[in-house]
Every structure is written in C-alpha cells, then in structure tokens.
C-alpha cells in the first residue's frame, strides 16, 4: 500500500495553478488544489479539478492511427510518420508553407513544444504556431 | 505527538499515518509509514487544511484491511463521525491524533485557516453577502433583499464543482449535481438557485461546518453560511447536531434499527 501526494502545476492553461495529485498504489485517484500555492490559493476551475481523468482515460491514443478511406486504421510509427510527411510535402509544394499550421499542446513537455515550433519554422517554413495554453 | 505517531507505526497500530510535511516550501499532506520513520520528525500540523479523511476513504476503498492513522482537527473528527454513519469508514479502520484548531471559550489559541476571515470588498458589501455573517444576522434583512443578494452570489458560480469535490462528506458515485433531469446541462452560470439549493438540501445532516467548500470556491460564495442555515433546521426539527457523534443520524435509517424518536411537528413548523 503506497499513498503519495505529488505537487504539480495544472497543464490546461497558462495561469499555472498549483495542484496536488493523490496517488494510491500508483494510480492518480484525485486532484486537489494546493492550498498554499500563491497562484490559485486553494482554488481550481473545473478543468483543473479533473486533471487526473485524462491520465486515466480509456479514450487515450495508445498507438498511431492513419485515416484511410475515412476510417482510422492502426499503424506503425514509421508508416504514420511517412504518411504525414508525404501529405505535408504535397500540401506545402502546391499551396505554400503558410497553408499549414502547427498547434502544440500543454499536455507535452516544454522541450517537445520547442521542437514542434522549430519544426514549423525551420522545416515547414511557417510562423503559424499556436498553443492551447495561450489564454 | 511525533513520538506517538512513531510508536503507532512501529507497533503496527497503524499501517500508515496521514499528516502534513513541508514539501518544496508548502505544507502538504503526507503519508508516513514504518519504512521511513525519520520523516515523522518533519511532520507539521498547520497551517493548511486538507481533507485527510477523504484520502482515508479512498485508501479504505482500495485496501479495506489497511489501518489508517490520521492527524485530526475538530472538523476532521466530525467528518469521520459522519463518514462512519454513512458506512464509508469503519471506526476500527481509523485512529486519530487530535491537534489544536479553532479557538473557543476553552482555548484561546488555534491553528486554522479560518482565524482571519477575509473582509468583503465594496461590491460584495453592496450586492452580495458577507461570508462572515451568521444565519441569524442575515435574517434581519428583508426577504426580497436577502433573495436578491443570494441570487447575486449564486450567479457568480463558474460550476467548477469544487465545493463538492473538496467536501469531506461527499462520496456518492453518482451526483445529483451532474444529473441532467435535475439541473440543466451546458450553461454557465449553472441553473441558479437550484444548483446550489440541491447541494444545500444534500448537506442537511451531513455538513460538518469545516468550511473547506468556501475555501475552495473561486468566486467566494458564502456556502458555509448556506449550509449552516440548513443544519440549523436539522437541529430544530430533529435535535441532531451533525458530526457530534458516530451514532445514527435521522437521515440514515437504511439497514439499521431505528432508535430515534420523532419530534413533534410544532418544531418543524417553527423551523419554517
């Protein structure tokens, strides 16, 4: 039996509320607002209160899916990346780099977000980069 | 206190002890175990309050055989009584170490986040309700004014469900607040005042006046005051002080022999 309380920062928006995950036997069972955190002072919005639900969600993607004839088919990483790269190449060649944009996420790390914008600017050649936490 | 916790862990009186420890400058709840007795030296008992008894119910659900020790202020103790009445915890599962909390006539020093309540700002004074009022103070006000002030408070609601999520005595798997037939879905603010009144009626005979809901409310609705009024009615009608003991409550009769004597209906009329 292991019970841990893990302090963290809410990843839904740019406010940066302090949250506390209640972890019992390796499962996050609940999210609590951190009472003494200077940003949220023990309060949270509905998204913050439900942070643990997306971690435990059954709907999370576990492997790449490629849309083929309107349906998502399970695929390997190599195949999925190749399909994405071919389509990007096709669209950028025909309509120019500003015809695509990259939306990054608060649910990945800072470094991954950095890589994503680098990919948009240096590889695709567009400044169309945005982020869900830019509230 | 620390010596007692250590002894309990060493002797196996409890398998884990829920208390507080400073982590990265914040007093956070911490589960102390026999494997790491030295951590007990760093245990603190304030100033932040978390619902440790709610954590205890989660642990009891995962592993019913675990014996839980817990740091308990008066409000934690009342919550444990209510959770026992509602079969969420068995008295044998939880041992408590009592710590200082709200000041009273008997003790002048307390450690609780409620010692210095915030004073209401000008807008709240003009249109809302001062959270520090008592139900009887509020009743001095004329009914229409009281109604408009309560509605002004309820309309601020951002439907975060924080009051329910943090509540130590809210444990239902299915919640009326999320039931589409009772409360309309998909609107903000939620349907007022029904959203708050549904919760208020469910707090009758359950609310232990810990004030965590009000603490967690991002828009500062005087929830504690609302539930105090509800429990005042419970007190008048049933002569029942919520959380004062783990004996049967007038609201939980299922499965046990009813030993309560009904009070005359005059009392009920008075309460209305």
Image (cartoon, coloured by chain):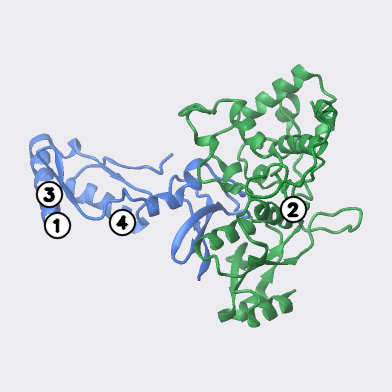
Chain colours: A blue, B green
The answer to whether mark 3 and mark 4 are in CB contact below 8 A is no
Res. B203 image quadrant = top right
Cα distance, mark 3 to mark 2?
Answer: 68 Å
Q: Quadrant of the C terminus of chain B?
A: top right
Disc 2: host chain: B
Where residue A66 sits: x, y (%)? 15, 47
| Marks 3 & 4 on one chain | yes
For the residue labelled by badge 2, is the local secondary structure a helix, a strand or a loop? loop
Where residue A2 sits: x, y (%)? 50, 70
Residue A40 visible, this angle: no
The residue depicted at 76 percent of the width and 65 percent of the height is B98
| Marks 2 & 1 on one chain | no
The residue depicted at 37 percent of the width and 42 percent of the height is A132
Cα distance, mark 2 to mark 1?
Answer: 60 Å
Where residue B110 sits: x, y (%)? 81, 58
Disc 4: host chain: A
Cα distance, mark 3 to mark 4?
Answer: 18 Å
Q: Which residue does the numbered mark 2 point to in the structure image? A: B247
The residue depicted at 61 percent of the width and 63 percent of the height is B29
Residue B53 visible, this angle: yes
For the residue labelled by badge 3, is the local secondary structure a helix, a strand or a loop? helix
């Amino acid at each position: 039996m292991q019970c841990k309380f893990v302090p963290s920062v809410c990843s839904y928006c740019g406010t940066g509320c302090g949250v506390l995950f209640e972890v019992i036997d390796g499962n996050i069972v609940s999210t609590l607002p951190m009472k003494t955190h200077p940003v949220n002072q023990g309060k949270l919005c509905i998204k913050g209160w439900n942070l643990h639900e997306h971690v435990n969600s059954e709907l999370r993607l576990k492997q790449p899916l490629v849309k083929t004839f309107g349906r998502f088919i399970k695929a390997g990483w190599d195949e999925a990346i190749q399909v994405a790269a071919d389509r990007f190449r096709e669209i950028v060649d025909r309509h120019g780099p500003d015809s695509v944009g990259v939306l990054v996420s608060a649910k990945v790390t800072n470094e991954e977000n950095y890589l994503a914008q680098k990919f948009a600017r240096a590889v695709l050649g567009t400044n169309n980069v945005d982020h869900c936490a830019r509230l | 206190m620390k010596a007692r916790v250590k002894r309990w862990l060493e002797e196996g009186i409890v398998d884990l002890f829920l208390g507080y420890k400073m982590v990265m400058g914040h007093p956070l709840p911490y589960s102390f175990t026999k494997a790491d007795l030295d951590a007990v030296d760093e245990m603190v008992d304030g100033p932040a309050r978390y619902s440790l008894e709610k954590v205890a119910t989660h642990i009891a659900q995962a592993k019913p055989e675990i014996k839980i020790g817990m740091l308990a202020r008066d409000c934690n103790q009342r919550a444990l009584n209510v959770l026992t009445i509602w079969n969420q915890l068995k008295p044998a599962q939880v041992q408590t170490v009592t710590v200082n909390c709200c000041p009273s006539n008997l003790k002048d020093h307390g450690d609780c986040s409620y010692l210095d309540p915030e004073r209401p700002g000008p807008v709240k004074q003009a249109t809302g309700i001062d959270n520090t009022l008592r139900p009887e103070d509020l009743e001095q006000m004329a009914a229409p004014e009281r109604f408009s002030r309560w509605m002004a408070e309820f309309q601020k609601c951002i439907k975060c469900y924080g009051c329910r999520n943090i509540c130590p005595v809210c444990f239902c798997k299915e919640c009326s607040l999320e039931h589409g037939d009772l409360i309309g879905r998909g609107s903000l603010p939620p349907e007022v005042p029904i959203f708050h009144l549904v919760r208020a009626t469910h707090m009758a005979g359950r609310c232990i006046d810990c004030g965590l809901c009000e603490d967690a409310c991002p828009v500062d609705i005087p929830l504690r005051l609302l539930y105090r009024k509800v429990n005042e009615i419970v007190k008048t009608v049933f002569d029942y002080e919520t959380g004062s003991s783990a004996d049967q409550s007038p609201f939980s009769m299922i499965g046990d022999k009813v030993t309560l004597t009904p009070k005359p209906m005059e009392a009920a009329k008075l309460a209305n």
